[in-house]
Image (cartoon, helix red, strand yellow):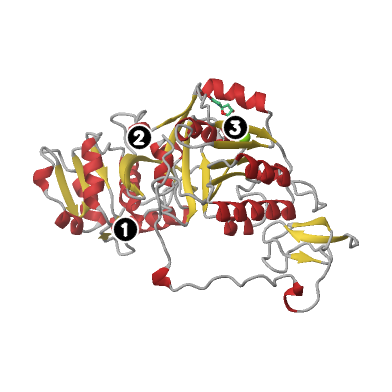
Amino acid sequence: MCAKSKTIYVCKECGCQLPKWQGRCPDCGAWNSIEEELFSPQPAAKGLGGGRNTGPIPQVESLREVEADEGERYHSGLGEFDRVLGGGIVPGSVVLLSGDPGIGKSTLLLQICQTLGEHLRLLYISGEESARQIKLRANRLKVDSPNLFLCASTDIEYVLRVVKETAPQLLIVDSIQTMCLSSVTSSPGSVTQVRECTSLLTQMAKTTGIPTFIVGHVNKDGAIAGPKVLEHMVDTVLYFEGERSLSYRVLRAQKNRYGSTNEIGVFEMEGDGLREVPNPSMMLLSDRPEGVSGTCVVCLLEGTRPVLAEVQALVAKTNFGAPRRAATGFDYNRTVLLIAVLEKRGGFFFGNMDTYINVVGGLWIDEPAADLPIALALVSNLLDKPLGDDTAAFGEIGLSGEIRAVGQSLQRVSEAYRMGFRRFILPQQCLKSLDASQFPGAQLIGVRTIHQAIKAAAAPRG
Ligand code: TYD
Ligand code: MG
């Protein structure tokens, strides 16, 4: 007997189901997120468990007896990729790779097949491209592993059967939005389809131990298309991002059950695929202007890795009305706060000045360590006095104008020293953890207040 299918309404954001359409989801509060779907219910079973779960009950184990050998991780041949995953691919893990269309998700996954294919049998399921298209791309990427098998299919049940028959050791599904389960009547890419297909793939990965990569698209707001529940179902969520017009791409873990989420991997898209950028500081500083005011280099920490970035400030006279405050790559409210501190505690006035802050290279800084360099760049441009090309700074600024310590100063200074910087303006507290003899020829200037910092920056070099 086939139960009659009925129309239900599902929230794209949280997956909540409603009997009627509404403008706003009552569960998660998202506006305009409810979509119509056809739903054919499974025949309802009666009683507890419906008489279906009559097999042996699942095993209960003592924590101490559970075997938790993480096992060997697979290495993809791209060190940046492995680092973001927490040191390689964990057997049985499900990784969701998402990003804007055309950012290079398929390219990245095809590229790792070359090294992985040396030891593992790989299956690449494509719902978007034909095997021929993948072959053409593989030619460009110089991927020709004999262990890589392709299958163009969008039916998840066939996919599962293919997996069972070919028994691959690693599975790639490109993309989840094209997969469909025939018993669900809604169209591919809809909330129910995406959820059901992911759930089947996750179950399979957990039972067979096949590591699975799933490509997911993002919608125009940058969130993964499909319900939020998708992110809960997988072990790791990776975002591949970058400006389409720039060739640099950043891979970031948003959730990772097997490692830290702070690591980033940097790649460059070239004619023959993605190339790792092991030294992002060099890339971010490559076009730095010399001898100009309003720029300062900051030592950031992206996870365990120190990265140097350039912050720029432009201070220009306001022509009309209230002064403008704008910030790219840095929090707007924090910019306004820093300007207020500079006015009240430093004695610099921006009341009739428009101020613009820019972080070079499309980077987004959310570390308080960038406060001091931004304040120095602002004052430098206001007074039109360059800070010096070999000056780097870091430190958090408090509301009373004090410079507060930030963590891992040794890593920050070492990276900047390695990149040729010789004058460091940093919180006085941080000097304690530094040994000046490690940095011959460098000037380490510890400061306690914003006043001291500006004085130190303006002081003649000696
Ligand atoms: P792709 O991996 O198809 O993106 P996604 O799967 O995320 O949608 O990447 C496609 C883009 O990358 C395309 O605009 C062309 C560019 N590209 C290169 O620049 N070099 C290359 O070697 C390849 C394969 C792609
Ligand atoms: Mg693709």
Compared to residue 376, the image places residue 196 above or below, namely below
Q: Are marks 1 and 3 in contact (CB under 8 Å)?
A: no
Most extreme residue toward the bottom, as rendered?
47
Residue under circle 1?
A: 397
Which of the pair 118/86 is nearer the observer?
118
Residue under circle 3?
A: 149
Which sits earlier in the primary sequence, circle 1 or circle 2? 2
Q: Nearer the viewer, mark 1 or mark 2?
A: 2
Q: Image quadrant of residue 233? A: bottom right
Give the image location of residue 125, x and y in percent. 64, 37
Quarter holding the N terminus is: bottom right
Q: Residues within 10 Å of mark 3 (few under 14, many from 20)?
A: some
Label 1 element class: strand
Q: Is residue 422 left or right of residue 76?
A: left
Q: Which numbered disc covers residue 278?
A: 2
Residue 124 in sight here? yes
Q: Residues within 10 Å of mark 1 (few under 14, many from 20)?
A: many
Q: Are marks 1 and 2 in contact (CB under 8 Å)?
A: no
- In three-dimensional space, the C-alpha distance between marks 1 and 3, rounded to whole angstroms, equals 55 Å
Q: Is mark 3 within 8 Å of ligand 2?
A: no
Label 3 element class: strand
Which of the pair 333/108 is nearer the observer?
108
Which sits earlier in the primary sequence, circle 1 or circle 3? 3
Q: Is residue 328 left or right of residue 345?
A: right
Which sits earlier in the primary sequence, circle 3 or circle 2? 3
Residue 316 in sight here? no
Give the image location of residue 51, x and y in percent. 76, 74
The residue under the point 56% across, 24% down is: 138
